[in-house]
Structure formats: C-alpha cells, structure tokens
Amino acid sequence: MTHDLKRLAWKAFDRVGTTICVVLVVSPALFFFLWMLSLSLKYEIDNGAYPPVFIPDRIAWQNYVGVFASNNFLLYFWNSVVVTGAATLLALVVGVPAGYGIARMKAERSAIVIMIARMTPGLSFLIPMFLIFQWLGLLGTLVPQVIIHLVVTVPIVIWIMIGYFETTPIELEEAAMIDGAGRWQTFLRVTLPIAKPGIVVSMILSVIFSWNNFIFGVVLAGRETRTLPVAVYNMLSFEQVSWGPLAAAALVVTLPVLVLTVLAQRQIVAGLTAGAVKGG
Amino acid sequence: MASVTISNVRKAYGQVNVLHGVSIDIADGEFVILVGPSGCGKSTLLRMVAGLEEITAGQVRIGARVVNNLPAKERDIAMVFQNYALYPHMTVRKNMEFGLKLRGAKRPEIDAKVSRASSILGLDPLLERLPRELSGGQRQRVAMGRAIVRDPQVFLFDEPLSNLDAKLRVHMRTEIKALHQRLGSTIVYVTHDQVEAMTMADKIVVMHDGIIEQQGRPLDLYDRPANLFVAQFIGSPSMNIVHGAFATDGTAAVTTPAGLRIPVPAVPPGRAGQAVSLGIRPEHIRLAPGGIPAKVVVIEPTGAETQVTMDVQGAEMVAVLHARLDARPGDIVHIAADPHLLHLFEAEGGGRIDLPIRELAA
C-alpha cells in the first residue's frame, strides 16, 4: 500500500516537474507572440497604457486593414515570395546533387568548407557583393537578393541532404546498376525518390531561413525591391513607434512561416536528426 | 547461361592485399558456392564478378567475354543482396520490371516475364505491395524474382539467407536449390555457412585470408580435406584434431605427449617420431569395449543422434553417436575409430598427408 502511494507521489512529482520545465522553456517564446498579438489588436492609447493592458476592451482590426492597404504591402509580399522561392529552388537544384556527391565520395573537406561559408557572418559577404552588383547594374532588381540568399539556403540543403544520402543503403544503387541503370538513371530513379522526405525538409527549412532573412535585404533592396522583414523595419522608422500597426505587420509577415513550421514540424525534426542514427 | 572463368584475380585496397591470386573455373549451369569465415575475401570476389569492385589484377571472363573493364550493367548478370536491396518506393511488380524497362523491353514481354517469375516464386498475391509490407522471406523471394525476370547469364547471390530465421533459411535453401534445378542457370553464391554450402553446391570453393584453400565437390571436400583449415571448416560439429607424433616403436600409431595412442593405417616411410596433427570426424568415433577410455563431459541428445563431448586424456573430443547413450557426465566410456577414416595433416602448415594407396586398401 505504502509502496503504491510512494509510486503515485513520485509519478505526480515527475509530471509537475516536467510541466514546470516545459513552461519555463516555452513561455518566453510564447509570450512574445501573445504580446505581439495583443499589441496588434489594440489602439495606440491602450498600447501606451500603464499598467499594461493585455486583453483590450476594444479590438483594433484596422491595424490589419492598414497593413494590407498601405505601404505597398502586396508588392513586398510578392518580392519575398520571388526571392525566397528562387533562392530555395536554386538551392535544391545545386544542393541536392552536391549533397549526394559529398555523401557518396565522402568528401568531408568540401562539407566543412560549406559549413564555414554558412557560419561566416552574412555581413562579410555583403560589401563585396554590393560592389559587384553595382558594377553589374543589378541593384534595382531582385536578382542580387536571390543570389545572396543562396549563401543561406545552399548550405542548409547540402547539409541536410548529406545526412539523408548517407543513410540510403548503397546496395540499392548497386542493385540498380546491375539492373542496367547508369549513374544518372540510378540517381534519378532510385536515389532521388527515396530521398524525397529529405528534400521536403531541406526545402521547408530553406524557405524559413530565406523568408526571415533581414540583413541582406536592408543593404541590397531598393524602395521597390524590399522584402517583408525590411518593409516592417521601415515602418518602424517612418511612423515612429506606432506599435499596433507594426505588430500587425510583423504577425502577418511571420504567419506563413509559422503555419509552415506547425504543419511540418514532425518532418523538420526528423530531417534535422537524419544521419544521426545510422540505419535508424 | 554462360561459364565464368576467374584467372589469377587479385584485389588490393591501397597497400592492403585482400585477394592474392584466385582462380576458379565455373562451368555453364554450375552452382558454385564460395565459403569461408568473414573477411576471407569471398564477397569481394563476388562483387568483382558483378562489376561493383575494380579488379586489381587478373582476368574475369563471363562466357567468352573478358569483363574486367565492363560496367556492371553490361555484364548481363543479376545479383541478390544480403539485405535484399529492394527499391522501397516501388511495388513488387515495379521492382521486378525495373531492369527490363531499363533495357527497353516491350510491355507484353515485360508482363510475360514478370508473371512467369512471380508464379515460379509464388509472388502473385503480393505483386501490388510495397517491400515494407512484406515479411523477410517474401522480400527474399522478390529479390530472387527481380533476378529471374532478367534471364541473365549468371546469378550472383551474396549471403542471401543470413537475415532469415533458422527455419525459413532451411526452407529457402531448398527453394533455391529447386530453382537452380529448374532453370539450369549458372550460380555463384557466397555464404559463411558451411551447411548451406554442403547442401546446395555442385562445387564448393573454401576461401581463407584471400586465398583458395580448396575447391571441389562437397563430399570430396568432406572426405579428403586438403588441409587442416578445410578439415575444421567443413563439417558440423567440426573435425576433432589431436596434436601428436608418429610412434617411434615401429607400430602404426600416433602418440600424444599425454600418452594417448591412436592406431593409424601406416607411418609414412622415414617419418617415425615426426610431429603430426590427426583428425577424426565426430561421426567416425564409435563406442568400443576395450577402446580408449574417455570421460563424458556433456551429452546432447537430438533424438536422431547423440552428441557427446568427451575428455580423452586431456584432449577434448566430440563424438556423434547414432545409438542412444546411457551415460552421465563424469562416466567413463570406451571409444575407438576406424584407422582408415582418420585424416593426417602436417604439424607445420597443416597440409594433408596422404598415405600410400596400398596402405589404405590394406
């Protein structure tokens, strides 16, 4: 009887402890979102109130209406779609075969060079790239941003794909070669279809990182070629600190990535740990 | 179908030599099994025939063609892998069609070949399933089906049964053998399991440390092993080996330092007193009143036979008796063996010592 009680108490303690830990870790991240949501739904007067109001009496939907009505929001949205889409697509075209090559040739040094490119602060690429794009006369277009986003997206794709291809049994490719396939046929008809989950994950992560990128846009984008994060930042400077519309815009910008993450979180976790457990 | 000729083939990875000049002649329609402990180079040799490993030196011919520099896809072979290597994103049918499609076969021909192979292997109800929905034995059969539809010159099997449980392994062994008899195809098969080799092969090639220890028909290897390694590798339980020397008192016997004295048919001329290893197959030991006394250590009855582990004056020996043994561990039994069924090997190097024929006949 006491034994049972002890076990029950321990179980309860265990559960409470876990809950406290989860709340401690998650709540700061969640709090930002909730506060942003609250800001975006309040009039300026409530936003400036002291003590702070979390749930307002009146909802200011106009903040959201304002986001879409002004500031060329749709243009910037489209810019973001083009830059992220093109940077991700190009990264897949380049990165998937590169990851395959590195995994099969065990070219660890190339993999490390790519990792270093990823770890180097983006700013160090910016000045030379800016000069090059100016010289090429591309600064008014989206091309420079697409190209420089590759600095972010290509390493992500390559590294995730290396993990995936390393776990693909080599016998499958050998079987295909004996069945009569050449190297490209083997890659296209056997290896690539098997790596589909990896491709999806690397695509999602590439989209997230590219979509959220801010610093490249700040330097390289003109008035017509801004992406969403830059556009939101510009609201901050022009309209002083009008928190409501700013928070509404920020939420709208974050929303696509947020939805994508929630939908694909299982795959993202699987993709990030791919290769960690051999044969798992 | 075609013959396969492997002539003085070597394989080196950098400075490390894995195969030191291996030659095997495989006749058209022959079922050859390469057997040996892991790391002996048997799988490497098979992969060289398949075109998955480069040939460092020597020559591999399939039929009349030298295939050293041909890529795998042009060698007209089919291979069954240890882990089956079925394409996980294709159904059983697609798996079997894949090779035919790549070779540009027409739809009616593909359908005919797939349905023939699937009926031979009993795969008809599984054709639309994915590999992950199949059991181990079924996957194994699909892997064989994928090889059969191609109608290749040579089938290569790389330890195809080692992932199956014991019962299924015995069943598939029979199936593969029946398949070979039905198709009459040339098969090169790699295994580390000597029972598989003995039961299925027309010819066994025993490999060890990158060389061929002996090749020949299964029962020839069993009855006349060329050296100590083959003697101990082929046969289960393995051959009992006693280290001793030829008797010096003029009698035909081998004596051990512990005082054990085993009669042999003859002492080769001029070798009295020389060291020798003597081999006795477990089933050649029989109970004999007045024989050598042995202390019973373990008794393992299987019903059909009784396996007895004994301590014979310091030497451990295993006997397989067809009679039931009414003894307990610790009891003393008396054993003997027919001298003509003993094997003699050089103490140095382990080569077989053949006694003159007339001595054997005597």
Image (cartoon, helix red, strand yellow):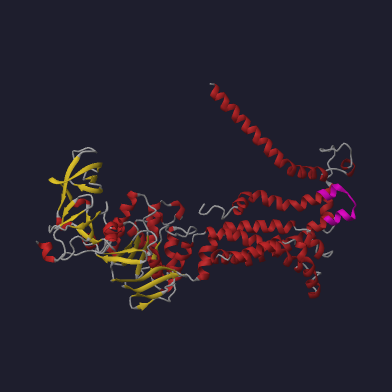
State the residue at coordinates (31%, 73%).
B3
Q: Can residue B178 be seen in this snapshot?
A: no
Which SS type dominates the magenta stretch? Answer: helix
Depth check, front residue: B239 or B304: B239
Whole-percent x, y for residue A124 in the image? 77, 64
Whole-percent x, y for residue A24 in the image? 71, 39
State how many labels appear: 0
- Region rendered in magenta: A233-247
Q: Is residue B80 left or right of residue B240?
A: right
Q: Is residue A225 left or right of residue B51?
A: right
As for residue A242 lying within the magenta part, the answer is yes
Depth check, front residue: A269 or B341: B341
Whole-percent x, y for residue B327 in the image? 20, 38
Q: Is residue B362 left or right of residue B277?
A: left
Depth check, front residue: A220 or B235: B235
State the residue at coordinates (80%, 75%).
A135
State the residue at coordinates (34%, 51%).
B168
> Which residue is outermost to the top?
A1
Whole-percent x, y for residue B351 in the image? 26, 64
- Quarter where residue B304 is shown: top left
As for residue A165 lying within the magenta part, the answer is no
Q: Can residue A106 be seen in this snapshot?
A: yes
